[in-house]
Amino acid sequence: MDISSLSFPLLAGIFIIAAVAIWFSGIKISDTTDVLSKHFGLGEALGGLIILAIVTNLPELVIVITAALKNNLGLAIGNILGGIALQTVVLVVLDVFGLGKKGPLTYRAISLVLVLEAVLVLAILSLVVMGHQLPTEVIFFHITPVDLLIFIVWIAGVKIISKAKNNLPWVVKKADADDQQEASDKASQDKDQQKNPPAIGKTITVFLISAVITLIAGVALEISSDAMAKQIGMQGLLFGATVLAAATSLPEVATGLTSVKMKDYDLAISDIFGGNAFLPVLFLLASLISGKAVLPLAQKSDIYLTGLGMLLTTIYIYGLIFRPKKQILRMGIDSLLVLIVYFLGIAGLVFISK
């Protein structure tokens, strides 16, 4: 059955049900990822980079595989690159609705590891821009050099960040009262968890079930939102960069808000940077399945949104390093700047033709 033939109210119902399912499964994923990160000694930042980022992007993984099998490479490319900018804006949502007046998100997160993760995003997206310039004939055994390089850089980046977790020659010189209170509260939570550790088998089971729900609901979310956009005649490019990107960012919003509530600020930010670094790795999978060089087929709008994502990530790098404490409209200065730049960037899509 073609879901696009359903009436708009039915499509809206599917969308809402899928969104609710993603929301509650996202909460469970965030809870269990926190436990698993501690159990396996990954730390909050690395746990978000690997576990949380990959699981929350499972819907994108399925969409890319399906699109590559159907030779719908435009959908695969848009799905990989289209949501990176908006996924970065999720940090603004966490800043405003997760912390509110308690302080900016980048002020609460005290970890240079997060800066390294953001730099990894920039490195991988730079390779995306470079790979787009190569001719489609540059492919060997269904693999392009840039696809392989993106994968290698991602693996190397994760390895370096893993080592940096405990070996960075960088410390906070002086923690203020807020930082000390946060650290005290978090240490108390960790101590309580050590006294009554959750059963790891049960935790893994809940994590896997929640991941499957996120996968299925995420695909339903994308398909139903795409069908609704076509029925109301919304332009494909604008839809992909706004509505569809927002829909596919729901898992990150749910897990991020839960992480902030648990005061795992590193985990919340790492989920976003980790997802943005992981998504371009799917170009390797798309090329392997389709047998074509996928990245060179990207449209100007795809590369434009990639550049926008890089710019937004750079702003947050400065925020993580300088940690501005001042808030405007319940958000940090960096988040406000990201929001402004994002909307200006989306407005610029009007001048881009495919």
Image: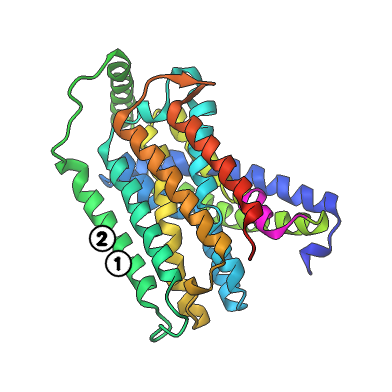
Residue nearest the observer in this picture, 173 or 207: 173
Which amino acid does the dot numbered 1 rest on?
Ile
Residue nearest the observer in this picture, 124 or 163: 124
Q: What secondary structure is marked by label 1? A: helix
Examine the residues drawn in magenta and state their main secondary structure. Answer: helix
Give the x, y percent position of residue 170. 16, 35
Residue 204 shows in the view: no
Give the x, y percent position of residue 327. 46, 20
**Going 78% across and 68% down the picture, which residue do you hit?**
2
Q: Mark 2 points at which residue?
A: 156
Is residue 123 on the magenta stretch? no
**Going 61% across and 67% down the picture, which residue do you hit?**
75
As drawn, 132 above or below 94: below
Quadrant of the rendering where the C terminus is positioned: bottom right
Quadrant of the rendering where the N terminus is positioned: bottom right
The crowding category of the residue bearing disc 2, from other C-alpha atoms within 10 Å (few below 14, some 14 to 19, many at least 20), is: few
Please provide the residue range marked out in magenta.
234-244
As drawn, 112 above or below 14: above
